[in-house]
Amino acid sequence: DWRDVEITGYVKLKSVNSGSSNDNFVWYARGGRHTGFGSPQGCEGVAYKGGLFYGGATRWEKEQWHSGGYVFAEFGKNIGPIKGKWVGLKVIMYNIVQNGKTAVKLELWVDKSNNNNWIKATEKIDKGGWGNNGGECGGKRDQIITWGGPIAAFRWDGATDVDIKKFSVREIVPQQ
């Protein structure tokens, strides 16, 4: 299962539907299949999702069940519009111990100039208190996703033409 992971890829957004301003690239892990709705079908569909919006905003979200139970972190750095240029997105998630309890550290990095100069755009530590829909699938209402899952994914919506390169998912040894 993918638990302590680094998910990386470079994208070049060439064309976008005239749709939602919320469309983004999102790399995610820690869950299973994302089908169904609610309990029990959607209970495998948990994930931490690191997003890079087409306008350049960055943000973490937690999906507590599919296809609902979303909770969003504060927006991180905005790197400006990304259409027409190569941009790297790297999300890193790993378990840590804080005050004797397991938490999850989430880091989102971007290479906005395609020159291997990564900057941390945002981070979040899920130590509880983030989310209130975990009870849908029998967990705590603010359930921390401390387990791994068989799926790590690269996703985007609303784009009609995207080039991709250097995609990878790798297991990491968590920093302590």
Image: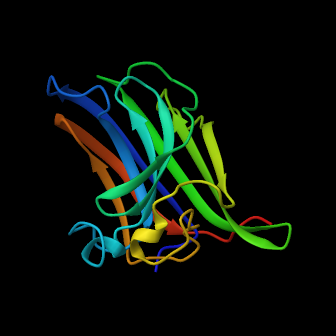
Please tell me which residue is depicted at 53% across the width and 73% down the height of the picture: 3
Vertical arrangement, residue 18 with respect to residue 87, above or below:
above
Please tell me which residue is depicted at 53% across the width and 55% down the height of the picture: 131
Total label count? 0
The location of residue 163, given as percent across then percent down, is: 24, 39
Closer to the camera in the image, 172 or 133:
133
Answer with left or right where residue 60 lies relative to residue 96.
left
Closer to the camera in the image, 143 or 9:
143
Closer to the camera in the image, 164 or 33:
33
Vertical arrangement, residue 122 with respect to residue 132, above or below:
above
Quarter holding residue 74: top right
The location of residue 158, given as percent across then percent down, is: 19, 36
Answer with left or right where residue 142 lies relative to residue 63.
right
Residue at the farthest top position: 80
Quarter holding residue 18: top left
> Where, quadrant-wise, is the C terminus in this rendering?
bottom right
Answer with left or right where residue 169 lies relative to residue 130.
left
Please tell me which residue is depicted at 48% across the width and 66% down the height of the picture: 134
Residue at the farthest right position: 99
Quarter holding residue 95: bottom right
The location of residue 138, given as percent across then percent down, is: 45, 78
